[in-house]
Image: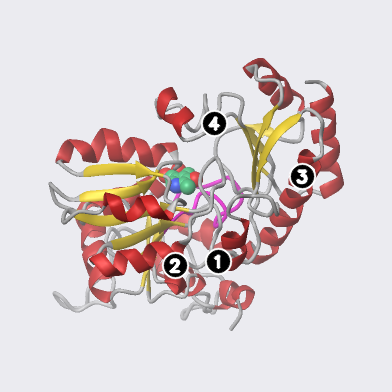
Amino acid sequence: MKFGTKSIHIGNNPEGLTGAVITPIYQTSTYAQEEPGKHKGFEYSRTHNPTRTALQTTLAALENAQHALCFASGMAVEDTIMKLLRPGDEVICTNDLYGGSFRLFTKVFANYGIKFHFIPLQEMDLVEIMINSNTKMFWVETPTNPLLNIIDIQSIVEIAKKYNILTVVDNTFASPFLQNPLDLGADIVVHSATKYLAGHSDVVMGCLMTNHNELHQQLAFLQNSCGAIPGPFDCFLVQRGLKTLHLRMVQHCKNASAIANYLVNHSKVEQVFYPGLTHHKNHEIAKKQMKDFGGMVSFTLKSDSTESAFKFMKNAKLFTLAESLGGVESLVGHPATMTHASIPREDRLKAGLKDTLIRLSVGIEDTEDLLETIEFALSKV
Ligand SMILES: *Cc1c(COP(=O)(O)O)cnc(C)c1O
C-alpha cells in the first residue's frame, strides 16, 4: 500500500458500536471492568486511549514501523528517549539542531551525568574520533535546523552498528512522506507532530516510531511511568491532519523549491540554504535519502545588518512572523532571536548560524503569490 492510502486507511476503521467512520474522541480517563482485571484492553487513559491507539497505528504505518508512541510534545518524546540512558553515558549529536533539543540536553540531562558532544555529523571523518566505550547514542537531525545541512543516515547507522550505539533520527523537517530513517537502519525516529504531521498549526504533539520490540517496551514503560501523554482531542486533530500529509508535502516542496531558486538569483541575497539546490553541499545525499527536499528554506542577505533582515520579515506580508513550521500557512523567523536564542551566540556562529539568517517555513499557498511577496519584501531591504 502506498503512503496516501495508508494515511487514510490504516488506523482509520469505522467504530464498532455506531459505524462512525471517524474514530471518536474518547474523552474518558477510565474504563469499566467486567470483573477485577477483566477489561477490553483499556484500563486508564495514561496507559492507553482508543483515539491515541488509532493515531499510533497510522503513524507507525507511515514510518514503516512496528510501533509508534505519541506524547504531549516533541520535547516530551526527547525527554523520554533520554531516560533510556544512565549517568556516565555519552551522546553524539548534530551541532546544528533544534534549540529546544540543545536546551534539554545541556540544561537538563547534563545535570544527571549524561554527556553530550555536538559535532557537524555531516562531516563523517569527525564522527568515529568522538566514540568511546561510554557512547550510547547518536542524535541525528536531518535536514538540520535552521541551516538545512543533510546528514547521511546510512553512514551514521553503519558506524553505530559497529560500536553497538543507538541511532535516533529527528525526522521533523522531512516528515515521513519524504524520508524514512528506520528503512535506512535507524533505531528510533522522532517527530514533533506539531509541525508537518498535524500540519495546521493548531496542536502541540510529539511521537516516536521503532521496529525494536524491546526498545518499544522500555519506551512505553517510561511513557506510562512519566506520563507525558497527549489528550484524545489532540490525537483526533493529528489523525485528521495526516490524511492530507502527502498532498501538502508536494505543495510545500514545490513552493520552497521555487522560492529557493528565486532567492539564489537575487542581487540582495548572499547565501541560500536548501538541499534541493544542486550546489548545496550535501545535495547528492539528500537526493539519495529523501523523496523531495522539503518546505524549509533559509538564507542570508548581502547586507549584514540585522536591521535589513528585520525589514525583510516586516514586509513579507504573506509570511507570518512566528516560531514553528510545517503548517499550511507560510511563516518567517529569525533563528538568532527566536528559535535558537537558547544556544549561546558563540556556539551559533561556530555552527555557521549568522545573526542575519532568515528562516522560511514555506506553506501551501499559490506559488505566484509567495514569490510576489518575497520580491516585494526584498525590494524594501
Ligand atoms: C519543534 C521541534 C521539536 C520540538 O517539538 P515540540 O512539539 O515543539 O515540543 C523538536 N525537533 C524539531 C526539529 C522541531 O522542529
First-in-chain label (3 vs 4) = 3
First-in-chain label (2 vs 4) = 2
Residue 259 forms part of the magenta stretch = no
Is residue 291 among what the camera can see?
A: yes
Q: Nearer the viewer, residue 338 or 164?
A: 164
Q: Would you place residue 315 above or below residue 228 in this image?
A: above
Identify residue for label 1: 289
> Is disc 2 in contact with disc 3, using a CB cutoff of under 8 Å?
no
Say if disc 2 is inside 8 Å of ligand 1. Answer: no
Find the magenta span and give its range: 190-205
For marks 1 and 4, give the one nearer the viewer: 1
The residue lying at 84 percent from left, 29 percent from top is 376
Tell me which amino acid carries mark 3: Ile
Q: Secondary structure at mark 2?
A: helix
Q: Secondary structure at mark 1?
A: helix
The residue lying at 66 percent from left, 62 percent from top is 292
Estimate the spatial distance between the alpha carbons at disc 3 and disc 4, rounded to whole Å: 19 Å
